[in-house]
Image: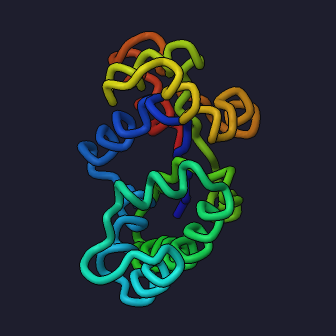
Amino acid sequence: MEVIGITGSIATGKSTVTNYLKSKGYLVVDSDKLAYDALTIDYNCIKLTKERFNLGNGSIDRKALGQIIFNDKQAKLDLEGIIHPYVIHEIKKQIENNQDEKIIFLDIPLLFESKLEYLCDKIIVVYLNEQEEIKRLMKRDNIDETYAKTIISNQMSIEEKKIRADIVLDNSQGIEYLYDQIEKLLKGS
């Protein structure tokens, strides 16, 4: 079994890649979904998050929490310290429970930032130059250029991710070109 990490920056096309892989029958473990689960179904993560951020009773307001961590680096680190152990445990459990799969893909947007390379045999980065990334993010999230640049600046640069990856999928030339690259990758695995 091979474990392949998929990463990239925001709005580079990771979801397009993972949805394509799922449509072909591959198992894709979604770390964003696991992080969401940590704050909706894991009692310990919910309790610790509410205590740390004084969120009171009821469900966690993810939008309000997002505003807090976006503007406060220490708060972001604290939240990651609460959620990441759960996410990593669940990823390892998925790998362990699916040993019969030829390939398992791990969709981890912040793979390098979270230092999770050790979970992967290979790492794919979905690449898009930063100018195109800004345009797509503005359109997708209906935000202005300044805000898009701020969001992107809070992540490792896509150029750095490209250097650190084993495989680069270029998403600058349309969806069919992207799919062709994925097919070539799958044939080589």
Q: Give 143 or 107, whichever is nearer the viewer.
A: 143
Percent position (x, y) of residue 122? 64, 49
Percent position (x, y) of residue 86? 50, 78
* Residue 164 appears left or right of 55: right
Q: Give 175 or 147, whichever is nearer the viewer.
A: 147
Q: Residue at x 44, y 89 (%)?
A: 44
In the rendered image, is residue 27 in sight? no
Give the quarter of the image for residue 175: top left
Percent position (x, y) of residue 118? 70, 63
Up-down relation of residue 2 to residue 181 (above or below): below
Up-down relation of residue 6 to residue 99 (above or below): above
Q: Residue furthest top?
A: 173
In the rendered image, is residue 107 in sight? yes
Q: Residue at x 54, y 57 (%)?
A: 69
Q: Residue at x 49, y 27 (%)?
A: 148
* Residue 5 appears left or right of 158: left
* Residue 22 appears left or right of 128: left
Q: Residue at x 44, y 10 (%)?
A: 173
Q: Give 174 or 103, whichever is nearer the viewer.
A: 174
Q: How is the image coloured?
A: rainbow
